[in-house]
Amino acid sequence: MFFGMTLYQVLWFFMIYALVGWMIEVSYHAITLGKVINRGFLNGPLCPVYGCGVIMVLMVLFTVGQTFGVETDLKKASSILLFVIGIIFATLIELIAGFLLDKLFHARWWDYSDRKFNLNGYICLEFSIIWGLAIAFVLRVVQPTFAGIVDAIPHKLGIILIIICYVIFVADIVVTVLTVLKLNKELAKMEEIQNSILRISDELSEVIGNGTLNVMNKIETERETRRAEYEAKRAEYEAKRAELREKYDHMKKQVMYNRLFGTGRLVAAFPNIKHRRYQKQLENLRTEQSQTA
């Protein structure tokens, strides 16, 4: 047994609540944003944070019961106890997940900085209370039903299904991590190109200013020669700038090409994502997204 559950049950509960969490996220943002988007960090219909949250709460609830002799049967346990455990550990999971994603990928996938009583934007009191109420409801009403469904699945069939689910899940994690790393590389390239465009623009301004003065300061017989040299140099800088601009615009379209998978899906799925290094480039991608929506 594993905190009152078999490993088989733990694996199934995690997968079920990750799927339910994904459905909640999609539904919530469909209502608030008026459009349906795959809100999960992964490509598949799973939000692991929800699965982790419920599993941790079930483990803690079992531990509390064993340690203090408190009633932990989900149909009999105190609603206040379920709420307190839910609010503490669901919030803890969100804090850890937000912090790790931020440090690993240099981006804030959600940010509560605009809400009262937040902790570095990772968590806030408002959503912690919501998580606590949601967990209490899930444990009291939903979990017994899901437990019955899991028990009703023929054991051999259940093992086969869970193996298939986790193989796909692990593959999705690998693909998503590679996609995030690719997005960071693309943002870095876009930043480099944009800096080159700005540098060339500054150099072009200097060419225009100095060129005009040089032409004006020359005697009549040399003006045409100087003017031709100046125009040639100006044309060269403008061509470089136009080439870089075209390359930059092409990269933006490539990043946002597919809204169902890859980098385009990530940008679309997290409209409030904040990157610690390339925030300006993300804003440019969102502009591209809004123009092509």
Image (cartoon, rainbow, N blue to C red):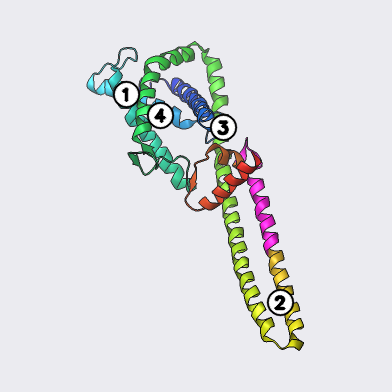
Q: In the image, what residue type sits under mark 4? A: Gly
Above or below, comparing residue 188 to residue 40 in the picture? below
Q: Which residues are magenta?
A: 241-262
Q: In the image, what residue type sits under mark 1? A: Phe
* Camera-side mark, 2 or 3: 2
Above or below, comparing residue 18 to residue 233 in the picture? above
The tag earlier along the polypeptide, 3 or 4, is 3
Q: Residues within 10 Å of mark 1 (few under 14, many from 20)?
A: many
* Camera-side mark, 3 or 4: 3
The spot of residue 30 in percent (x, y) is 54, 28
Q: Quadrant of residue 242?
A: bottom right
Residue tagged 1: 83
The tag earlier along the polypeptide, 1 or 2, is 1
Residue tagged 3: 38
The spot of residue 286 in percent (x, y) is 57, 44
Label 1, label 2: how many angstroms apart (C-alpha)? 74 Å
Residue tagged 4: 53
The tag earlier along the polypeptide, 3 or 1, is 3
